[in-house]
Amino acid sequence: MRKLFPLLVFSLILAAACGTKVDVPAPDLAVTSRPLPEPAASVVRIPITLALDSVARKAERLVPRGQDNEAEWHRLGEFPVVGTVYLKKRCERDPLRMSLSGDRAEVSAHVRYRARVAERVCVPVAGCRWVPLAGCGHDGAMATLDVGLRTDVSWTKEWSVVPSTRPRAVRAGVRCRLTRANIDVTERVQNEVQKQLDRAAPQLDAEIREAVDLRRRVEEVWDDVQKPIRAADSVYLLLRPDSVAVEPPKASGAKLSTVVSVRVRPRVVIGPRPEVRALPLPELRRALPGREGFRIALTAELPYSVANQLLKEAVVGRELTFRDHTVRVRAAWLYGSGDGVVVGVRVAGDARGTLYFVGRPVYDPVTRTVSVPDLDFSVEARTLLRNAAGWLLHERLRDDLRQAARFPVGERIDEVRGDVDRALDRQLSRAVRMSGGVDAVRPVGVVVGPRSVAAVVEAEGHAQIDITIH
């Protein structure tokens, strides 16, 4: 015992001279936390307006402009008293008028006509001659008819346009009643015009299907919005569309319009141009879940190498005195562990060794910094220091580290926001242009990764895609 006492005294003197050893075990490096959920799906609107002037011009060619049967007599039929009656007639129409309203297109025209009836009288030796019985539309106003075609337009789930054209009932205006012969030829002319319209209806449907061709136009856009959009060097915007819907067609004047909505889940990819597997155009839907506008998660990464440099500049070399004890910070570093971060601090002086602090990083939208407001001694540090150097469990050391662990990321958020703004306002292809921009950002959270800690904000903005119809 007498031999051990001098050795114990010597050890205490040596410990006092070299400082209390406080090597705290490092907290376990936990699995990286899961990423924050993506923003809700966004719905981008694509207004499509189709001018149907060409359809009107083709309809003009499909419906005969008139009929001239005045060169010779044509048998009309047998009638009481007068017997067999023959007819000459001429009809002509005004140019077709096309009007569109809602999901319906109408083509109409005003028809004018005139007619004469006669009987053929044959006398032996003298031969046969035509004896006029009556006429209409020659001396005064011509008889009139109003004719038209009506087309209802709808879409199928395969993106086909389904026009359904049917003749509108021919309406008589000024009738052609041949009073002397007690004959009314109005219905006969109506029936002939009706047959012409019946023949034109399916041809007009075919012309509308070709002129509208909604599937081809939407497929072009669908292919374009799936391609990565280069926003800056090594920064790409992926729109990631997953479904489309179309509103019922609306017509006005000579234009048919609709709005195609594309649901997208955009994200920013930093690195080489990503490979994207193109998806075929999905079936048409009538409505899409998701808010209109544009929502995208923007990530402002803070590599640990940068954070460590900032920590070094803030605390390394600082001397701290508590309760007549002084320590000097020799090194400081930060790394991720689970959903939180660990700050390691190496000290010398009245205590020597390594201390560890843990906390959860948060993003402050006011100061636009990532900080660790709950940074505190690790459980292992508290346990060891209570037994070896309780005076180190001081709020000042903890508070100084909390203040030092504040990392500005606002400029990086501005950079990424600017990249997205530029990516949203560009020509996607010869016929497709996207316009839009970020209107506001709101904090979402912080993601801790193996190489960095990242502030995540959700950018809300507007986006629209316009198609140029050639």
Image (tube, helix red, strand yellow):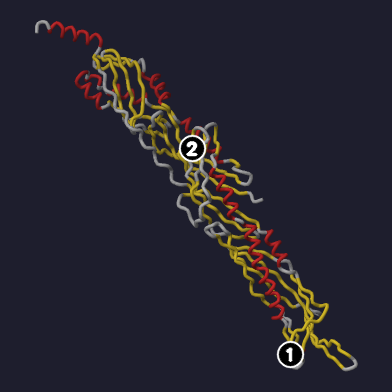
Q: Amino acid at mark 1?
A: Phe
- Near mark 2 (Cα within 10 A), the count class, few <14, some 14-19 or many ≥20, is many
Task: Pick whichever, 334 or 229, lies toward us.
Answer: 229
The answer to whether 331 is drawn above or below residue 335 in the figure is above
Quickly name the residue at label 1. 79
The answer to whether 378 is drawn above or below residue 191 in the figure is above
In this rendering, position of residue 171 left or right of residue 7? right
In contact (CB < 8 Å): disc 2 and disc 1: no
Please report the residue visible at 69 percent of the width from the left and 81 percent of the height from the top.
187
Q: Where residue 278 sits in the image (x, y, percent)?
A: 52, 45
The answer to whether 427 is drawn above or below residue 309 in the figure is below
Please report the residue visible at 62 percent of the width from the left and 70 percent of the height from the top.
166
- Lower sequence index among marks 2 and 1: 1
Q: Where residue 66 sits in the image (x, y, percent)?
A: 76, 71
- Near mark 1 (Cα within 10 A), the count class, few <14, some 14-19 or many ≥20, is few
In the displayed image of the protein, which residue is found farthest to the left? 1
SS assignment at label 1: strand
Quickly name the residue at label 2. 268
Q: Where residue 11 sits in the image (x, y, percent)?
A: 19, 9
The answer to whether 414 is drawn above or below residue 389 in the figure is below
Pick the quarter of the image with the N terminus: top left
Please report the residue visible at 62 percent of the width from the left and 57 percent of the height from the top.
212
In the displayed image of the protein, which residue is found farthest to the right? 125
Q: Amino acid at mark 2?
A: Val
Q: Where residue 303 sits in the image (x, y, percent)?
A: 42, 27
Task: Pick whichever, 356 or 457, lies toward us.
Answer: 356
In this rendering, position of residue 241 left or right of residue 427? left
